[in-house]
Amino acid sequence: MTTPLPVVLAGARGHGRWHVENIRRLQRQGLVRLAGICETTPLTAAEFGGEPPAQSADLGALLDATGARVAVVSTPIHTHADLAVTAARRGVHLLLEKPPAPSWAEFHRMAEAVAEAGVACQIGFQSLGSRAVPAIRELIADGAIGTVTGIGAAGAWARDEAYYRRAPWAGRRRMNGADVVDGALTNPLAHAVATALALGGADRAEDVTAVETELWRANAIESDDTSCVRVSTAGGVPVTVAATLCAEQPREPYVLVHGSQGRITLWYKQDRVLLQRADQGPREFGHDRTDLLENLVAHLTTGAELLVPPHATGAFMRVVEAIRLAPDPARLPGSAWRLLPDENRRVVPGVDELVAEAADTLALYSELNAPWARPSTPRDHHRGVSTR
């Protein structure tokens, strides 16, 4: 019988609570053992739901003390690279939450440390663990929708005022001199960007030739809450991703593959695929999903292929870098948004349709008919060419 791999979790509050439950699930299967928790403030027994394992605010010391083989890092964005490097230098394998870093330089530093140490690193884009992704790639390769002409993605979500007050780094572009880049496309709807790039066959850094950004904010934050990007790729397939956290009616985000003879829609949180072709009726498919920590364990114990290694998120990080370097998000005029008092959140009337139209047409907000999405200006439309 295989000995369970000892795991340390860095960041057990917020989204980290999901990781606690997932580790417990794998622990019941005998695959892992939660050996320690790294938190600045220790978890109480009530928070943990029982007596917590070893705890420390020092990840390096905790890894040394527990003999952990795997570290799961689910901490604030701007701490990812440092903690990943700390684990890698101790020979500890990693599941690193998305976004892996707030800048290209930090991502490169992390990836170099991982490569030098020879450890495995899985980036936490859970949507890329879906069987729907390779299934769609197979449909494309088989010519199911003809020639792919572009990829669109739409994310119309809602976040209330409390979401931006949950942590000091929430909604920030930088904090205490460090990059954070906590915007709609880089954090809550980062899966839309990463999945769209993956389906467009452009997941590596060298696949990106240019990124155009348009960033706005209705909320009183530094980062964008309503934004879009258009990525030019080496393969010639444009990728446009539109997002908002100010939707009137929040709905499931999706990626849309445009073809010369049809289209494929993936609702990536549901692993649901819709194939539409002009000469045939629509067909819908459901797919399974592989948990990324489970895949990392399988990689370490049986040699299974790692689903989301760092190089497979290089293109996503080029988008993050373009957003980081873009002018600060433009404030939407007061006439463009309203407050929903019962939900304590801001909505942008008409943005739901705008997001869908951007994904459908591959156009940027400034190219669509919205009262606040005025023609491009140096402030609200930025074309950033990725460096190699």
Image: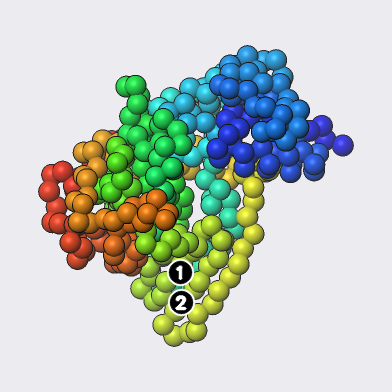
Query: What residue is disc 2 on?
Result: 276
In this view of the protein, which residue sits in the foreground, 65 or 142? 65
Give the left or right position of residue 21, taking residue 311 as reference: right
Quadrant of residue 205 within the rendered picture? top left
Q: Is residue 147 above or below residue 125?
A: below
Quadrant of residue 278 within the rendered picture? bottom left
In this view of the protein, which residue sits in the foreground, 316 or 72? 72
Q: Is residue 155 above or below residue 323?
A: below
Q: Is residue 177 above or below residue 127?
A: above
Is mark 2 in CB contact (under 8 Å) with mark 1? yes
Name the quadrant of the N terminus. Answer: top right
Q: Is residue 255 visible?
A: no
10 Å crowding of disc 2: few (<14), some (14-19), many (20+): some
Any mark on residue 264, and which? 1
Name the quadrant of the C terminus. Answer: top left
Residue 297 in percent (x, y) is at 69, 38
